[in-house]
Image: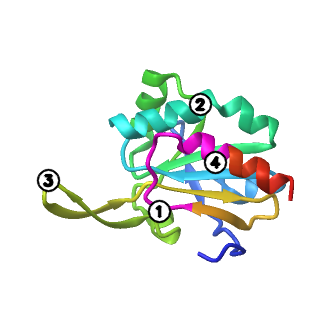
Amino acid sequence: MDKREKASNFCLNDFEGKKHCLKDFSGKWVVLYFYPKDNTSGCTREAVNFTESKGEFEKEGAVIIGISKDSPKSHGRFISKHALEILLLSDEEHKVIEKYGAWGKKKLYGREYFGTVRSTFLIDPKGFIVKEWRKVKVKGHVEEVLETLREMKNK
């Protein structure tokens, strides 16, 4: 995606069945991240790291939204089990995941399959994607996103 591409709007449900649309966050910075699966080690670490840094992101005027193809019920268990405080949305048909180019071929133990490729997008208050991370490695990622957010805000 081009650095100045407008972020595609979407509407998805949270674990309580409440619908959230990207346009609802207009005027705020949005950290939109896509992750493969609730309660797996990397995804849990990423969600916990975002939760631990939520206050820092809020100080910068940013909201954090995580999206996976897990069901709202799965998200509810994931949030409860790990005391997560970030917004997780369910994209069971992976339409939004595909729209953002975060759906692709993966390999595990020599087997190829399609799934969510860990990706993060930083969206400015006007709704433009200003930075994207593809094939994210969890270690240090949240800190890098926060640092980039601060840099972008000071431009």
**From mark 2 to mark 1, how far is it between C-alphas?**
21 Å
Mark 2 neighbour density, 10 Å: few (under 14) some (14–19) many (20 or more): many
x, y percent for residue 146: 68, 43
Tell me the element at label 1: helix
Q: Which mark is residue 97?
A: 1
At x 73%, y 50%, the residue is 149
| Quarter-of-image position of residue 114 | bottom left
Q: Which mark is residue 114?
A: none
Left or right: 6 in relation to 96: right
At x 75%, y 53%, the residue is 24
Q: Which residue type carries mark 1?
A: Ile
| Magenta-highlighted residues | 133-146
**Residue 96 inside the magenta-drawn segment:** no
In this view, which residue lies farthest toward the left? Answer: 110
Q: Which residue is mark 2?
A: 51
Tell me the element at label 3: loop
Please tell me which residue lies in front, 25 or 61: 61
Q: Which residue is mark 4?
A: 145
Is the Cβ of the residue at disc 2 closer than 8 Å to that at disc 1?
A: no
**From mark 4 to mark 1, how far is it between C-alphas?**
19 Å
Q: Which residue type carries mark 4?
A: Val
In the image, residue 23 above or below residue 144:
below
x, y percent for residue 141: 54, 45
**From mark 4 to mark 2, how far is it between C-alphas?**
13 Å
Sequence-first tag of 2 and 1: 2
Quarter of the figure that contains the N terminus: bottom right
Q: Which residue is mark 3?
A: 109
